[in-house]
Amino acid sequence: MLISWLMSLVFIGGARGAGKTTSVTKEISGIPPKIEHIALSIGVKEHAAQKGIFRQRTRELLPNVQTALTAQVVREAKDKSESKIVLLDGHYTSSYFVYPHDFFPCLREVAHLFDIFVLFERSADKIKAAHIQKGKKPRPEDVVRLEIAEEKKEAGYLKNLTGKALVTTAPEDFPHVLEQIGVLLPAYYFAGRE
């Protein structure tokens, strides 16, 4: 299915270590400011700091504050997306059981603002290998598998809730997915990268 490139706000989610931020940054580097990439966690931290409620880590915020700040970041991204394409990357889930040390806010109240959802899928083995390669301590495989399952489940829920398209991809297939859904097509021409 070829989706119109007229969409403007794209949410990119997946388990930690699935390759979202790395792939997006690599793919849009060198493309003019027609496309903007926002890491949701960074945006929320900045808003928390501006409001004077940022302590050491965003996860220390109360869930309702975290969710409110997420909604604010998404609404601002939607405003920006009227003049450019905005790729917002983060996580679909907000389960304490999946993320015992982190809290990722729920997107359900602002899900209708997105034009399309993208889910990065990567096996637990590959996520573990990526963490080791980056010098990070790998998480237990059962935790990673649960995280992957919960991300997929919540992404499907948001697809059904909003009626918007959900595209799944592996990090190495991300450039092809962007071409398929047409998100980067005008920017590629704009940048002279045909």
Image (cartoon, rainbow, N blue to C red):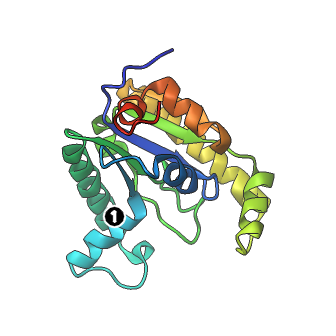
The location of residue 154, given as percent across then percent down, is 51, 41
Asked whether the viewer can see residue 139, the reply is no
The residue at the point 75 percent across, 47 percent down is: 123
Q: Residue furthest top?
A: 1
Q: Nearer the viewer, residue 161 or 76?
A: 76
Residue picked out by circle 1? 43
Asked whether the viewer can see residue 38, the reply is yes
Q: Residues within 10 Å of mark 1 (few under 14, many from 20)?
A: some
The location of residue 132, given as percent across then percent down, is 77, 69
Above or below, 35 against 136 in this view is above
Above or below, 110 against 124 in this view is above
Q: How many numbered marks, from 0 up?
A: 1
Q: Nearer the viewer, residue 128 or 64?
A: 128
The residue at the point 56 percent across, 37 percent down is: 175
Residue 111, by quadrant, is top left
Amino acid at circle 1: Gly
The residue at the point 47 percent across, 16 percent down is: 2
The location of residue 171, given as percent across then percent down, is 64, 44
Q: Which residue lies furthest to the front in this view?
A: 192
The location of residue 190, given as percent across then percent down, is 34, 35
Q: Nearer the viewer, residue 191 or 18?
A: 191
Above or below, 78 against 52 in this view is above
* Residue at disc 1, secondary structure: helix
Residue 101, by quadrant, is bottom right
88 on left or right of 147:
left
121 on left or right of 156:
right
The residue at the point 42 percent across, 43 percent down is: 11
158 on left or right of 78:
right
